[in-house]
Image: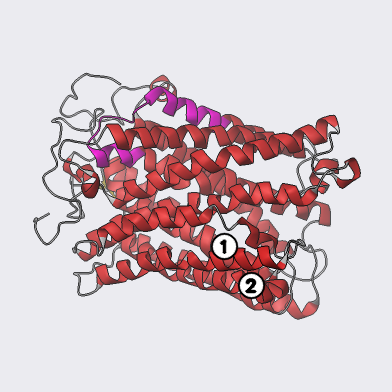
Amino acid sequence: MSSTTAVAGKNYLTDPKGIGSWIYTLDHKRIGLLYLVSVLFFFLVGGIFALLVRLELWSPGQTVMSADTYNKAFTYHGTMMVFMVIIPMIPAAIGNFVLPLMLGAKDVAFPRLNLLSYYIFMAGALLGVGTLFFKGVDTGWTFYTPYSTKTGSAAAMMVMAAFVMGFSSILTGLNFITTIHKLRAPGQGWTKLPLMCWALYATSLLQLLATPVLALTLCLMAMERVFNIGIFDPALGGDPVLFQHFFWFYSHPAVYIMVLPAMGVINEVIPVFSQKPIFGYKAMALAVFGIAAVAFIVWGHHMFTSGQSATAGFIFSLITMFVAIPTGIKMFSWLATMYKGTLRFQAPMLYAYAFLFVFLIGGLTGVVLATMAADIHLHDTYFVVAHFHYVMVGGTLMGFMAGIHYWWPKMFGKMYSEGAAKLAWFFVFMGFNVTFFPQFIAGSQGMPRRYYDYVAEFTIWNQVSTVGSWMIGVGFVISAIYLMASLVGGRKASDNPWQALGLEWQTSSPPPTENFLVDPVVTHGPYDYDKVAA
């Protein structure tokens, strides 16, 4: 970590200059922006695949692509969105930028490891995208065996891509945990830590503990495929259900690797735009660890129809219900924070409202799916597709949009058009619900997921869903236009445009290369709006 003093008037965007200064940078802010640009590129590509899938499902029979092409399209949509977008979207992109600033630190604990994490992520992501030129992949993002070990597609190459990207998650998690432990500003005890930092801490623990399980699972699958070793293939003496146990032991915690950082963003946005202290700070901090702990012991609820015993199914069902307790604590605390607050309906807060709405629907339908009798009927239907999109995609995406609008002035020193942001929010929020809520209805009536074709009775629900996907696309196009326009002609942002109390708002916008010209000393909590004038 550099020990030089930041020079007034210079910031991380302009000093130093040149493309090489970005390629070899150790500045956490620049690395966060590199992640952001990369994630948004993969989001664009994955989104295009989603639009193609929805277009194909406009009507029964072939619409725009063959069945084989459809299988590849939804595989790339799912794989890109999970491994290249939703998992790194908030922790690696936004978290890398704001975490040291929120701690009053000059950088993360291991700047070189941080840069290495980004290049590992890019190496894995490019390896995954490269499968498009080697017959493609048609397994779905879950890579279920034995099909994934027998298909003629480039499944082994995609599996190794996910294996490589896992190391990036592990190293980032290790870096964040060390940073939070060792680099907090003087006076910033654990009870004065922003809740975003608590969320990133819990997420990092999940990354460290769960990701190696996925890495080993994918490595075993690749070995079986390449060397014909019997691990998961029953024809070779293996057990395909064992793959599901290993995969979901990681992939259910992965849901919270995606959602917990989004909750952290909402924890920051709601108090600022309510100008009130967060309700139940300690309970909110403990709740993220409660959610993370339960996430490790509920993987079996993905496997109610796999033949596991009724006793095991009952236990997994019961434990799954318990996740509602810490989640409910957070939901009620957010509502209590807003109660009688000075609410401001600006873009970050609108996306926070959207998060509360879609996550509530996702959570309530999760309780339905956790009930074994209901899950037997709804398993592998579009009801499940709608549920996990409301939780994973809706929750993470609304949290990301809240965060990017909230910290955009700090990142670039520019204000975006508030009117355009509200218009985009309308299209994204309404489009999301128009897309996925009809899938609850179609799924409850029996429409199976992943299918290329369907019976005519489901046509109306698929057409409404497809129109909704176009609305989402319009919303993100508008967002891209006004955010990029703000970089060129946007009004200059003040150091603290939202009247927030966090340390990141006590430095210039954009920050100097070393974050703070004078090392900050914490004298109050980040949510003490009843004690301190912002």
Q: Write down the region rendered in magenta.
A: 97-122
**Where residue 265 sits: x, y (%)?**
35, 54
**Where residue 458 sits: x, y (%)?**
73, 77
Residue 439, label in figure: 2
**Where residue 46 sits: x, y (%)?**
61, 49
State whether residue 427 is above or below residue 402. below
Which quadrant is home to the N terminus?
A: top left
Question: Which residue is labeled 1 in the image?
Answer: 389
Q: Residue at x 68, y 76 (%)?
A: 373
> Label 2 crowding class (10 Å Cα cut-off): few <14, some 14-19, many 20+?
many
Secondary structure under the numbered disc 2 in the rendered image: helix
Question: Type of residue at label 1?
Answer: His
Measure the alpha-carbon separation of dots 2 and 1: 10 Å
Most common secondary structure along the magenta stretch: helix
> Label 1 crowding class (10 Å Cα cut-off): few <14, some 14-19, many 20+?
many
Q: Looking at this view, is 64 or 119 the one in front?
A: 119
Secondary structure under the numbered disc 1 in the rendered image: helix
Q: Looking at this view, is 73 or 205 the one in front?
A: 205
Tag 2 and tag 1, C-beta contact below 8 Å: yes
**Where residue 349 sits: x, y (%)?**
32, 63
State whether residue 513 is above or below residue 484. above
Farthest front residue in view: 311
Farthest right residue in view: 235
Q: What count of labels does the image hold?
A: 2
Q: Residue at x 24, y 67 (%)?
A: 344
Determine which quarter of the picture holds residue 100.
Answer: top left
Residue 533, label in figure: none
Question: Type of residue at label 2?
Answer: Gln
Q: Give yes or no for residue 114 being in the magenta stretch.
A: yes
Q: Give yes or no for residue 160 being in the magenta stretch.
A: no
